[in-house]
Amino acid sequence: MRRRTVVAAAATVLITGAAVTTGVAFAHEIPQQPAKYGAGHAADRGGMVFVQSNDPKHNSVLAFRRAADGKLTPAGEYRTGGRGGAQKDNPFDPLASQESLVVDRTRQMMIAVNAGSNSVTTFRVRGQRLTDPHTVSSGGDFPSSIAVSGSTVYVLNAGGKTNVSGFHLTDRGLQPLSKSARDLGITNDATPLFTASPPQVGFSPDGRHLVVTTKSGNTIDVFGVEKDGRLSAKPVSTRSNGDVPFSFVFDRKGHLLVTEAAKSGVTSYALRADGKLQVITPSVESGQQTLCWIAPAGKFFYGTNPGSSTITLYHVDDAGLVSIGGKKRRAPARSTWPPRPTDRCSTCRTPWLARSRASGWRATDR
């Protein structure tokens, strides 16, 4: 009962005061090659920002040119051929996930979920344009998050009998990986509730583990990844140090950082070879409301708190110890725009951090 109460409280904070929208997706920026100036410095030449619309009729990827000063100029719209989707009880963030739009830089391929039509679309990235759309079934209901490692892709299906389903990434798009689907032990309606849907799937940096967070289960599940891309039959499940584990990233040393929406905390873990997690820094709380998404930018990490309209700056040292703003204190970095940050993206080559608006889209960075 306590787990359900905590999750419901987090969902209430997300919804309160937010504009109702179905246009929320994730974004990526693709920076241009920087020009060198001086010793060890590079001038920012801008880049491209791609944003998924999550339109319930015609899902699209929207392209923007980013100038060196951060100004965005529309540069095209590319329909996925699928439909966006919205969970039942959270109009503020219809997908309630992280990594719904991703880029494979090696193959120059972009992958987007179509939550409303249970499919996934790939595009080839050609400079400032997207070409060659290819759409396949996601292997389940309400796909909401994507993980890529080499030529192996896994999609998190958050609706129905929740699962992760595997694919091979080829030059022609995604091809299903036979016998790769793994159930997560959570059964939802085909269009899930925010409080019951798993929010993210992702690979460890070495590609040997696949990580899934679950809000209702309050767990972090880790599957082993075989050489052929298939997963272990069952995950190693670790109870989250804080309630409502949401998104996660790995730092440069391979430490796992997980956000906790209930009390806006970040916990760092060491991921062992057997899939077990060991807490390094427990629940560094910012004092803000409903921390959901986190993004790396060099040695720093930025977390968005839609419940309090703020962004928090985190520092992680080489041992995986987390602090706020690089200091041992609880002082959040406040944002004045947008009124409700709903996801984030960053690029290690520039100081820009892109955020989405509650009344707009969610963004991604290439």
Image (tube, helix red, strand yellow):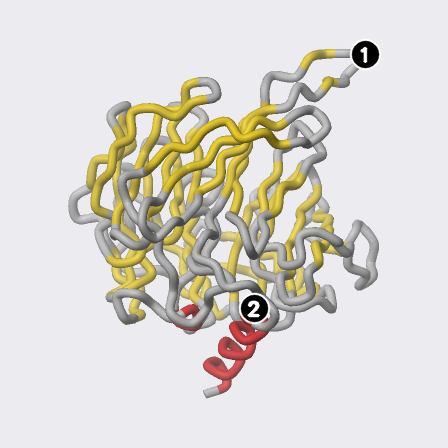
Relative to 26, is 165 on the left or the right? left
Where residue 7 sits in the image (x, y, percent)? 50, 76
Query: Which residue is outermost to the bottom?
Result: 1
The amino acid beneath tag 2 is Leu
Q: Quadrant of the N terminus?
A: bottom left
Number of labels in the image equals: 2
The amino acid beneath tag 1 is Gly
Where residue 119 sits in the image (x, y, percent)? 26, 47
59 lies above or below 70: below
Crowding at mark 1 (Cα within 10 Å: few <14, some 14-19, many 20+): few
Where residue 268 sits in the image (x, y, percent)? 61, 57
Relative to 162, is 2 on the left or the right? right
Specify the quadrant of the image occupied by residue 298.
top right
Crowding at mark 2 (Cα within 10 Å: few <14, some 14-19, many 20+): many
Where residue 31 sits in the image (x, y, percent)? 58, 25
**Which residue is at the front of the view, 96 or 129?**
129
Q: Which mark is residue 14?
A: 2
x 64%, y 61%: residue: 305
Q: Is residue 134 visible?
A: yes
Disc 1 to disc 2, how far (Cα)? 46 Å
**Which residue is at the front of the view, 115 or 159?**
115
Q: Which mark is residue 38?
A: 1
Secondary structure beneath dot 2 equals helix
Q: Is residue 270 visible?
A: no
x 37%, y 53%: residue: 144
